[in-house]
Each structure stands twice: as structure tokens, then as C-alpha cells.
Amino acid sequence: MSGKSSSGRFAGAEKTERRKDIQRRKTKCERLFHTIPTIRPLGGTSIQIFPPLRSPPDCYSGNREAQESVMPIQRSKPKNRLLVYRKRLGFSQKQVAHLLGQADTSMISRYERGGSAPTLTGALQLEIICRAPVAFLFRELYEELRQEIRKEEERLAGRGQQQLFRRIQHENQTK
């Protein structure tokens, strides 16, 4: 019967060994994550309130291969503030989609996550809806473009200044 009684519960020795194994894993997690918030019901054992934010491999489950095969989630910061402005105004994605004349919220979601950028018309509509300039809504993109343009302006101004300086030198030499 492989150590189980007829009721399906573990036999005494195996039950004790299982408790020890669970305690070892719990202790390992507590060392890695300092303390795990728990509550102790009257006359009972500690119950974990919520799991730690990150669990090390092989902490709660013995399936290390399954944990290693999961790709880490990489969250990048959205390149716009559409979500912030929409929430500040109390609009749902559905309401904004309706105001933009779109049938569903998928495009709004992509805009907010930075997955795609709206057309010029769409950006201007979002400016009106959010009551904020496009440069505020797409601040990171705005700053990136501004820096590129300023750098190119400086490069062009430098070239123009050199030509002007050469022309003045040439005029002074011919006098």
C-alpha cells in the first residue's frame, strides 16, 4: 500500500518525515527571505499569510526543472503617460476607445504599454481627451527627439560658424 493507510492518509513515520521535509524547506525560505509573515490561530500552528515576493528555486516545490524553464518577466517602463492621465481623469479604456472612434480597447492598451504609437491624428485626439499636451503624454519620446534635434542643430551651427569664420578671415586677408 506504499505507506498509506486505508483512509488515504500517510502512516505515522512517513507523516513525520513529510513534516520534517516541509519544515526544512520553510526554514530554507525563511533564511533567504528573513521572515515570512504568518498568523497563529488560537491553539494552532502558524499559517503563512501570503507567499514571499520571490521564491528561490526548489523552495516550495521539488520541481527545479519546471522553475528553471520559466522565463523571467521583464517589465519595461512605458514610454508615455497615457495611463496616468487616463486614470487621473477617471476614464476607462473603453471610454477612451469610444472617444477615439475605435471598436475595442486593444489599441488603447497597446498605446499605454508603449507597444505602438498613435498616428498624428490619434495623438492630437488623445491630447484633447487627456487635456494635456502631446509632449506631456509622450514625454520620453519628446525628450529623445528633442535631444537628437538639438545635437544636430549644434552640429549644423558649428559647421555654419566655421564657414562664416573662414569667409571673414578671407575677406580680412584680401583687404
Image (cartoon, helix red, strand yellow):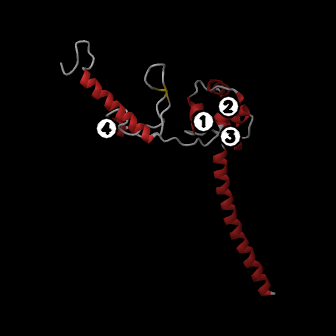
Q: Residue drawn 67% across and 45% down?
A: 139
Circle nearer the N terminus (4, 3): 4
Circle nearer the N terminus (1, 3): 1
Q: Which quadrant of the figure has residue 83?
A: top right
Type of amino acid under label 4: Glu
Residue to which mark 1 is pinned: 112
Residue to which mark 2 is pinned: 86
Spatial distance from mark 3 to mark 2, Cα to Cα?
10 Å
Type of amino acid under label 2: Arg
Labels 3 and 2 touching (C-beta < 8 A): no
Residue to which mark 3 is pinned: 137
Spatial distance from mark 1 to mark 4, Cα to Cα?
35 Å
Looking at the rendered structure, the secondary structure element under dot 2 is helix
- The image position of residue 128, as x and y in percent, is 73, 33
Residue 161 vs 62, above or below: the answer is below
Residue to which mark 4 is pinned: 65
Spatial distance from mark 4 to mark 3, Cα to Cα?
43 Å
